[in-house]
Image (tube, helix red, strand yellow):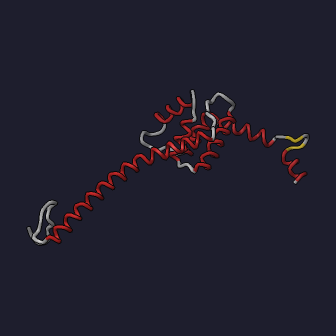
Amino acid sequence: MSGTEAPLSGATTNDPRVDGILEALTQVGALMAQQAQQQVAVNAGGGERRTQGLIEQFLKLKPSKFTGTGKPEEAEQWIEEMEKIFRLLNCTDVDKMTLAEYQTDGNVMYWWQAMKDTVFLAGIVIVWENFVTTFYEKYFSRCARDRKLTEFVELKQGERTVDEYDAKFS
């Protein structure tokens, strides 16, 4: 063995002090490896525990399920309710998708599964904005949104339009 090579674990040198240091370093290395393995195990379970805790917090807020059987504006109301909760819980895009999927029911659940399988490429992370766009195309079409906007613009307070009412009392 040359002077630059370290002795193997369990090997000894002629100097008891060096042997003691080598033994201590071997023990420290073993402890560090053990701690690293424990940390990996904790981190692996930590994401799961975080998601479970998030779902519990989410469900305590009693969000509504979306079944797609109501009026088109109910789709918009559901998205707005979900986004309000997401802001409160400080959700990531992945969290939003997990929670939103959990709150779909019936045909909506089957529709979304089919969309994920056919429209979105496998392995691609679907972000909330893409979900909302696809969701609105199906459940709150551009035509329905335009109709609601026209209804709002033409809304009257008595004989006055909203703009006239606002101008008079502002």
How far across and down, in percent of the image, does residue 168 sit?
90, 51
Looking at this view, is 72 or 11 the one in front?
11
How far across and down, in percent of the image, does residue 149 sit?
74, 41
Q: Residue at x 65, y 36 (%)?
A: 75
Looking at this view, is 7 or 18 the one in front?
18
Q: Residue at x 87, y 42 (%)?
A: 157
**Quadrant housing the C terminus:** bottom right
Q: Residue at x 50, y 42 (%)?
A: 52
Q: Is residue 159 left or right of residue 131?
A: right
Q: Is residue 56 above or below residue 69?
A: below
Looking at this view, is 105 or 21 the one in front?
21
Q: Is residue 104 left or right of residue 157?
A: left
Q: Residue at x 53, y 33 (%)?
A: 112
Q: Is residue 152 left or right of residue 71?
A: right
**Quadrant housing the N terminus:** bottom left
Q: How many marks?
A: 0
* Quarter of image, res 111: top right
How far across and down, in percent of the image, does residue 136 sit?
61, 38
Looking at this view, is 127 or 94 the one in front?
94
Q: Is residue 152 left or right of residue 56?
A: right
* Quarter of image, res 13: bottom left
How far across and down, in percent of the image, does residue 169 sit?
89, 52
